[in-house]
Image (cartoon, rainbow, N blue to C red):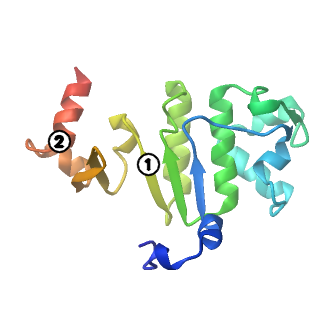
Amino acid sequence: MVDGINITDVSSRDLRTHFAVVPQSPFLFEGSLRDNLDPFQLSDDSKIWEALEKCHVKEEVEAAGGLDIHVKESGTSFSVGQRQLLCLARAFLKSSKVLCLDECTASVDTQTASILQNAISSECRGMTVITIAHRISTVLNMDCILILDQGTLVEQGNPQVLLQDELSRFSSFAKASAM
């Protein structure tokens, strides 16, 4: 259920238009940066620049030559961190109801991870954000987390509440991670 709607009743095509993913391994296609960020040309330049600013990559894009710069195959023109922030900007442009973050901080440095988390925190209010993560710090600000063990739900709740629960797997994992 998303916003009271059973998604099994929604066509895959409609569902995909309301769903954005920021993958663990950020990917950009060869072509212009504009086409990578807005492949269906639904946003004007001001919206694209706004998304880049929200993700703290506007200055780098301006310095590199702007929205029409050529992106090399797989996005190798940019660092992994920059590619991840560009993927987040692409997700923001989509104005999705659901944002799935698949280990999006796993391959980036702590500064980029912090930028990603802050941008998500400030820009994703009113959205359903599904975060797949192994780092405790990635989920501490979430409203609710689900703990899975081999695909089975074993615990759920507010992360701050679970941290206080001595019997919680989340609490045990957090303590073990801190060592």
Asked if 121 appears above or below 72 in the picture, the reply is below
Q: Nearer the viewer, residue 105 or 121?
A: 105
Give the percent coordinates (x, y) of residue 63.
84, 30
- Identify the residue position indicated by label 2 in the image: 169
Please tell me the numbered disc located at residue 114.
none
Circle nearer the N terminus (1, 2): 1
When the figure is inspected, residue 61 is found, relative to residue 120, above or below; the finding is above
Q: Amino acid at mark 2?
A: Arg
Report whether 6 appears left or right of 71: left
Q: Left of 60 or right of it: where is 15? A: left
Please name the residue shown 80% across and 35% down the image: 61
- Split into 4 quadrants, where in the image is the N terminus? bottom left
Residue 103 horizontal side relative to residue 74, left or right: left
Q: Secondary structure at mark 1?
A: strand
Residue placed at 81% from the left, 64% from the top? 42
What separation in Å lies between label 1 and label 2 (alpha carbons)?
A: 18 Å
Q: Residues within 10 Å of mark 1 (few under 14, many from 20)?
A: some
Which residue is depicted at the point 23% across and 33% down?
A: 174
Q: Quadrant of residue 173?
A: top left
The residue labelled by disc 1 is: 131
Residue 158 location (% of width, % of height): 26, 54
Residue name at image x 34 percent, y 57 percent: 143
Disc 2 residue crowd, few under 14, some 14–19, many 20+, Cα 10 Å? some
Q: Determine the residue located farthest toward the left in the rendered image.
A: 167
